[in-house]
Image (cartoon, rainbow, N blue to C red):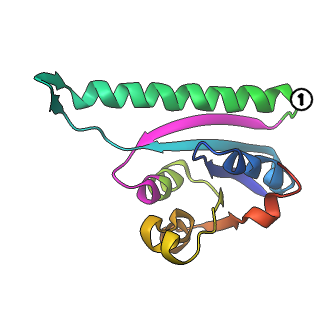
Amino acid sequence: MYRRILIPLDGSKESEGVVDLIRGELAPDGEVVLLQVISPAKTQVVGGQVLLGSQREEVERSKAETYLRGVLRELDSQGDPTRRRGEVVVAESVCQGIVDFARKEEVDLIAMYTHDRKGIARLIKGSIASDVSKRAPIEVKVIKPRELASVI
């Protein structure tokens, strides 16, 4: 049984489905933390207009927070009493953002979905789940598409 489980979300229904799969692994007084990592925004000049990085980043943070609130509302509507919260972090790399957050929050398990790309797609896009598994100081449970088939 885990006291605190971190579930990184990428905006897909599949990543959200991980919540249902790990319910039985959470301690009765445990907590699920849903995480979305956003990239830092740089100041740009577009068509003579200066777009401040801080403003663009705030817009992205707001979108991520709105998304997480929606996911939490949906979970609440299912009547599940599990304690949950959503967090947004800014990081240069999604992998590093997840690993750093897990350390800071002292989570016991990272449970995350992998799109399980193969061949060229994996070379181009990489695998965040694989990178997190290599770098995280704690257990990482990687959920593959076939494991989610019964949940979503």
Can residue 111 be seen?
Answer: no
Q: Can residue 96 be found in the magenta stretch?
A: yes
Rendered-image quadrant of the N terminus: bottom right
Please give left or right for residue 142 compared with residue 132 in the image.
Answer: right
The image position of residue 38, as x and y in percent, is: 42, 42
Position in image of residue 110 (x %, y %): 63, 58
For residue 32, above or below residue 141: above
Q: Name the residue under label 1.
A: 79
The residues colored magenta run 82-97
Residue drawn at the location 82% of the way across and 54% of the way down: 21
- Say if the magenta span includes residue 94: yes
- Amino acid type indicated by mark 1: Gly
In the image, residue 76 above or below residue 16: above
Q: Relative to 84, does residue 95 appear above or below in the rendering?
A: below
Residue 89 coordinates in the image, percent (x, y): 44, 41
Q: What element carries label 1?
A: loop
Q: Residue at x 57, y 25 (%)?
A: 66
